[in-house]
Amino acid sequence: MLGASVAAAYLLGCIPFGLLIAKLKGVDLRGAGSGNIGATNALRVMGKKEGAATLAGDMLKGVVAVLLARQFAGNDAAYIAAAAVVIGHDFPVFLGFKGGKGVATSFGTMLALQPVVGLICVVVWLVTFFASRISSLGALVSFACLPVSVLILYGGDRLLLAVTVFMTAVAFIKHRPNIARLLKGEESGISHKAA
């Protein structure tokens, strides 16, 4: 059941909610804004409702992947499924392995794995975002806090720590262009109204 759970998690991650929502609106999300299929670009390109729907969908697939794996293959499988669903979101086979950055999906997995850690990440993201209006900065700060929070609260759970270190590393890799713009002071923020 472990293999099936991991495969199912990856395929769940491959569902491009932002792209599907944009298609219903007659928009090619990959050809608009930053070209990313995640919630931030959906917000910028289409507006608050579509951005929120993309965020909810991407978080939900993280939650579902973890809960299904835990139900059918146990707790260790849930941790591995958490990594698999993020990989599916970031590198979806149906989109030529060009996906999102895994922020919402990672938060969804953490809310299902360890709700306290998940909530810490969400709160850190919200505080950083509302202080700066820069989504990528909120994501990077929250991911930096992720393994630290796990180490403090669940230091004995090595598998959970490994998964969170993996998620953080992938998130920083996917955010490399954002990091470069942040260092130059050129990263764009999000205004109260979507473009």
Image: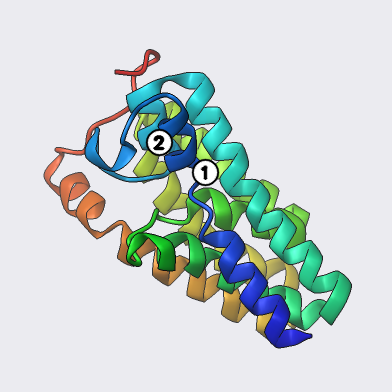
Comparing 108 with 183, the one in front is: 108
Q: Secondary structure at mark 1?
A: helix
Q: Nearer the viewer, mark 2 or mark 1?
A: 1
Left or right of 84: which side holds 93?
left
Circle 2/circle 1 CB separation < 8 Å: no
Where residue 79 appears, as percent x and y from the top left, is 69, 75
Left or right of 158: which side holds 76?
right
Comparing 96 with 34, the one in front is: 96
Quadrant assignment, res 63? bottom right
Give the residue type that dot 2 points to. Thr
Quadrant where the image shows the N terminus:
bottom right
Left or right of 56: which side holds 101?
left
Q: Secondary structure at mark 2?
A: helix
- The residue where tag 1 is placed is 17
Kindly tell me whether residue 117 is visible in this rendering: no
- The residue where tag 2 is placed is 40
Vertical relation: 139 (above or below) 12? above
Q: Residue furthest right?
A: 71
Q: Residue drawn at (41%, 71%), measured in percent from left and top?
A: 169
Where residue 76 appears, as percent x and y from the top left, is 76, 82
Gap between marks 2 and 1 measured at Cα: 12 Å
Q: Residue drawn at (36%, 44%), measured in percent from left and top?
A: 137
Kindly tell me whether residue 163 is visible in this rendering: yes
